[in-house]
Image: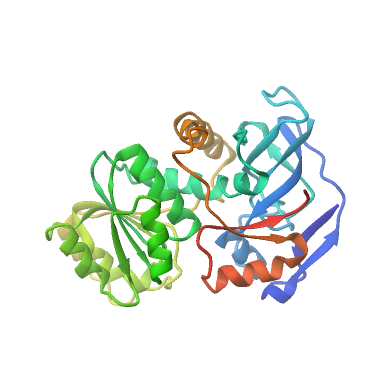
Amino acid sequence: MKCVVAKKPGGVEQLEVVELPKPTPAKGELLIQVHATALNRTDILMREGKTGYVANPIIGVEIAGTVVEVNGDSPFSIGDKVMGLVNGGAYAEYTVMPSDRAMMIPESFTFEEAAAIPEVFLTAYQTLIWIGQLQEHETVLIHAGASGVGTAAIQLAKKLCKAKVIVTAGSKEKLDFCQSLGADVLINYKEESFDTEVHRATDGKGVELILDFIGANYWAKNLASLKVEGRWVLIGILGGGTIEKVNLFDLMLKRVQLTGTLLTPRSDEYKARLTNEFITIVTPYFERGEIIPVVDKVYPLEKVGEAHTRMEENHNTGKIILQVQE
């Protein structure tokens, strides 16, 4: 089967389409013929050799495709169209997936649209609901609002919690798109100081919750933007992972709840629980068209390097998709 690996840790030039044997599903797993997969920041870290938690040499963690083999008891049958998280191996014509992590693709969705769902929507649901404990009518600050997780989080916050959503992004086009998904307050971080705008939008009170993809560069402004006893979920370090001269008393003074999280290295059991709650709560919104997957651009598998470059240059609004086969 065709698949994508990194010849050695490094840049996009290390990505290579190679032939490897088709995997065999273990007990409790499905063999999936992959039609589409999607890019995540984790994939870039895998390519660069910076993750120690994905053993599969084939890059990628989410797929949409067709069940071609079932090993053991499963609610799924051969021919079912499914999407979900895999333990690496997504950039391939075939991959295996734990049966309890698979989700049926809504009938109206293409494989490319379905591939835009698993990682970002499960991450957004986990960070907003499980970790962030977002309540109805609270205010949430979502950085990188036009990213895959950002576009998912905007919709989930509005539909599930009727939250007031403040977003940051780096262009008018991206902010306009965030607004079309339901964002209430739009901040261009290149032109405005987001903490000042947050205070203006909240009458000086700050937000109850922050979804932070940026890390070090936003530390002081995030702290200033957060309400007393607010929650702050760190899910990325695009702006650096090292902060100098941090005054921990500032966190204590505001009684801040700061939580760091990653989804990919979580246990199979955790991902299964998250997936099944997500199916119950969110699938009806997909079926009614009230929440939508956001596809930025679709590339053929052979142009995986171009796709990675687009993500690294932050040109995407929503998910970048790789079409593996029609």
Q: How is the image coloured?
A: rainbow
Q: Position of residue 166 (x, y in %)?
A: 29, 57
Q: Is residue 306 left or right of residue 296?
A: right
Q: Please name the residue shown 33% across and 70% down the image.
A: 188
* Quarter holding residue 172: bottom left
Q: Please name the residue shown 64% across and 40% down the image.
A: 83
Residue 145 seen from this side? no
Q: Nearer the viewer, residue 53 or 166?
A: 166
Q: Nearer the viewer, residue 131 or 12?
A: 12
Q: Position of residue 132 (x, y in %)?
A: 33, 46
Q: Please name the residue shown 71% across and 22% down the image.
A: 73
Q: Is residue 44 left or right of residue 57?
A: left
Q: Is residue 14 left or right of residue 228?
A: right
Q: Is residue 4 left or right of residue 272?
A: right
Examine the rendered structure and indicate whether residue 26 appears above or below residue 228. Answer: above
Looking at the rendered structure, the number of numbered marks drawn on it comes to 0
Examine the rendered structure and indicate whether residue 118 appears above or below residue 192. Answer: above
Q: Position of residue 216 (x, y in %)?
A: 37, 71
Q: Please name the residue shown 75% across and 60% down the image.
A: 301
Q: Position of residue 179 (x, y in %)?
A: 36, 56
Examine the rendered structure and indicate whether residue 268 appears above or below residue 152. Answer: above
Residue 232 seen from this side? yes
